[in-house]
């Protein structure tokens, strides 16, 4: 009952915010693919400078939720959308590379390991380097260091040059609500997506490839996946998060 009340309150807040934000009215949308609902927020090259990554506040304490992120905005700025942007340790520090505002937190991890993050190839979502958006395999990233304005590492990669990750199984019984980011072939568009219901990795990757037309895509997380998207009246509650990515509209 409490969880349901929180969700309804979150939706109500999202609806109220959406009525005051005509600039973000078309930023996010609801889509269906193979019978599953998804929420998708699309960012084009023209707006890549509006993307931000958050982890800590000025006091050094982890922000952890969308309300705290909104509290960091300057007067007149509005949060168009936000979602969790990678895996994190028990203290909310990022697993792998996190780069924002010229500050690097965590080191690039190239070794294979346990869990989803270590299911190589994993990758880095990079904003503002040689192209507006890139999903780069972690070992290639470590060799090249392309000079991203923002970067967050996660894993596994969902798509590698248009192909599904080789370890994804069509008949897998591992199903979760999942979120991630995909990049178009020309690297001018990024799609941030979250499933409405539990899906397999194979389903989720197919949505990015066949439903959105992504060339490369990166998994952010599963059980803790959350989205703030006032354009579609959505403001998820739940467990606290580590890295958060979102788009900010200014005055």
Image (tube, grey):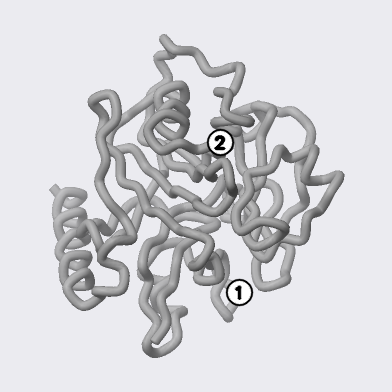
Residue 54 in view (yes/no):
no
Q: Is residue 222 left or right of residue 135?
A: left
| Eye-nearest disc, 2 or 1 | 2
Q: Which residue, given by chain and number where applicable, does mark 2 sit on?
A: 215
User: Please, which residue is most extreme toward the front here?
Assistant: 186
Disc with the residue nearer the chain's start (2 vs 1): 1
Quadrant for residue 247, please give it: bottom left
Question: Is label 2 in a helix, a strand or a loop?
Answer: strand
User: What residue sits 55% from the left and 54% below the top?
Assistant: 188
Q: Is residue 159 left or right of residue 202?
A: right
| Quadrant in which the C terminus appears | bottom left
Q: Which residue, given by chain and number where applicable, does mark 1 sit on?
A: 60
Q: Position of residue 212 (x, y in %)?
A: 41, 38
Q: CA distance from mark 2 to mark 1?
A: 37 Å
User: What residue sits 63% from the left and 49% below the top?
Assistant: 134
Quadrant for residue 218, please give it: top right
Q: Position of residue 91 (x, y in %)?
A: 59, 55
């Amino acid at each position: 009952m409490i969880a349901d009340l929180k969700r309804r309150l979150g939706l109500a807040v999202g609806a109220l915010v959406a009525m005051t934000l005509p600039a973000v009215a078309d930023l996010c949308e609801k889509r269906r693919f193979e019978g599953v609902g998804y929420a998708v927020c699309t960012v084009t090259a023209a707006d890549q400078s509006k993307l931000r990554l958050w982890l800590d506040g000025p006091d050094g304490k982890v922000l952890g939720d969308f309300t705290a992120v909104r509290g960091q905005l300057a007067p007149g700025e509005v949060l168009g959308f936000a979602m969790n942007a990678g895996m994190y340790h028990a203290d909310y520090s990022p697993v792998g590379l996190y780069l924002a505002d010229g500050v690097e937190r965590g080191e690039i991890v190239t070794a294979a390991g346990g869990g989803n993050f270590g299911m190589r190839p994993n990758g880095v979502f990079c904003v503002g380097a040689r192209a507006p958006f890139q999903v780069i395999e972690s070992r290639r990233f470590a060799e090249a260091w392309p000079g991203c304005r923002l970067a967050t590492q996660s894993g596994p990669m969902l798509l590698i040059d248009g192909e599904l990750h080789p370890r994804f199984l069509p008949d897998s019984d591992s199903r979760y609500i999942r979120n991630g980011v995909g990049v178009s072939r020309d690297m001018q568009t990024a799609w941030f997506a979250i499933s409405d219901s539990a899906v397999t990795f194979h389903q989720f990757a197919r949505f990015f490839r066949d439903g959105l037309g992504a060339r490369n895509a990166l998994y952010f997380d599963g059980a803790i996946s959350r989205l703030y998207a006032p354009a579609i009246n959505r403001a998820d509650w739940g467990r606290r998060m580590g890295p958060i990515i979102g788009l900010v509209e200014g005055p």
